[in-house]
Image (cartoon, grey):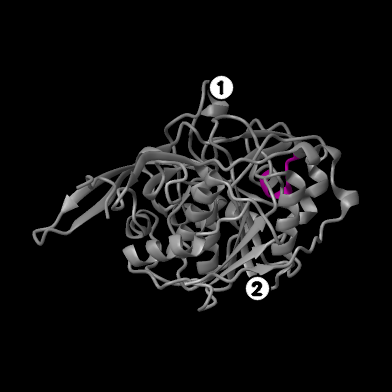
Amino acid sequence: MSIFKNLSCIAFFVVMPISFIDASSIPVTLDSYHAHPPIHSYLNSAAIPQGLSPDDIKAVYNLPATGGSGTIAIISAFHHKDLESDLAAFDSEFNLTQCTIKNKCLEVHQMALLIKTDSGWDMETALDSEWAHAIAPKAKILIVEAVNDGGTELMKAVDYASSRSDVVSISMSWGGDEFKGETKLDSHFISKNGKASYFASSGDDGAGASWPAASSNVISVGGTSLHLIETKSKAGKISIRLNSETAWNGSGGGVSSYESAPAYQKDYSIPRSNGMRAIPDVSFAADPMYGFSVYHNDKGVSGKNSGWNVVGGTSAGAPQWAAINSLGKGITLNTLYKDKDSASNSAFFRDIVSGKNGSCAYYCTARKRYDYVTGLGSPVTWKF
């Protein structure tokens, strides 16, 4: 379904409140940290999808129709009690293989027995699960539900995902202000098997660094705007093609206040970082005006978000990059910068060279090679 189209079973959840986090490694300021999901709904709910479809995105980014292996872990907060039915509706609409708890494609791990619900986080969890499954239909989806949106509880959820040997990607579609002592948590973004890659949204407030995207062990995902052209075949089939991709004005990005430049960025020689960690690393479609079709039926709780929604924000990029990694299992921070620095860089990235996310001159303007709005660029392959 094109973005240009006009309007016309019981779930069994795994509960294991185990904490792997070392209390001595938690900065005091993490206790006061609260994350928010960078997500935006462009249109009120409707009976049919009005946003981008999986086929649209796969065409834009040259992704395969199917594939994926291993487990994609999605770190969320609060409990989404209707997640499985939301995902089922999405899969049915777009002719995707059903991803259910019964067929072991979907697993929901609650970090406590009783967790409150939250409508905003429900929408985020629906977006993340639906689009991770859309990009990598053969991968398993693990939803890890933190007790709340506090830093300590979210890190417990991250640690659980990190402990799983089956997890290949960990998506964190949330963020908040950086804080003193955040570097002490970098080790938590290394999986027990040493093979999982971590992805986090860079934020939706324009210029400025956020955490955990600023961690030197996390792939930070910024945002772009897709400019699409719709065509109609003689048979009446509607398809879209990409006209251009520019920086989205809400994309978070900048220079970390606490994280030093990691080796992969030093080797790449990012201008004007002053020896500190630069974000984002990569980018993905985020502009809610050309957003993603997301099914979330909150049964009238909010009064407007029941059914199909058009959703954007950098929170959409983290789970989809995580899914792309499931397709090829070649994405690490080191490989991303080496791929972009190679003579064949255009086979890996679409360099985003226009657009801004603020009025801070150099740091707010997209340009060739690397910029603080879209990083190295958007993917044009899954084979990194």
Q: Considering depth in this image, is 356 or 140 the residue closer to the camera?
A: 140
Mark 2 — residue?
Answer: 166
The N terminus sits in image quarter: bottom left
Give me the disc on residue 9.
none
Q: Tell me which residue sits at (83%, 46%) in the image.
A: 184
Can you give x and y, in whole percent of width and height, for residue 277 in the image? Answer: 70, 39
Q: Quadrant of residue 233?
A: bottom left
Residues rendered magenta in the picture: 260-265
Q: Amino acid at mark 2?
A: Asp
Can you give x and y, in whole percent of width and height, for residue 196 in the image? Answer: 66, 64
Q: In the figure, 260 relative to 163: above or below?
A: above
* 373 sits left or right of 62 in the view: right
Q: Tell me which residue sits at (61%, 68%) in the image.
A: 13
Q: In the figure, 327 relative to 372: above or below?
A: below
Q: Are marks 1 and 2 in contact (CB under 8 Å)?
A: no
Mark 1 — residue?
Answer: 360
Can you give x and y, in whole percent of width and height, for residue 15 in the image? Answer: 69, 67
Frontmost of labels 1 and 2 is 2
- Disc 1 on helix, strand or loop? loop
How dense is the environment of label 2, judged by Cα within 10 Å: few (below 14), some, or many (20 and up)?
some
Can you give x and y, in whole percent of width and height, for residue 86 in the image? Answer: 44, 60
Mark 1 to mark 2 CA distance (whole Å): 42 Å
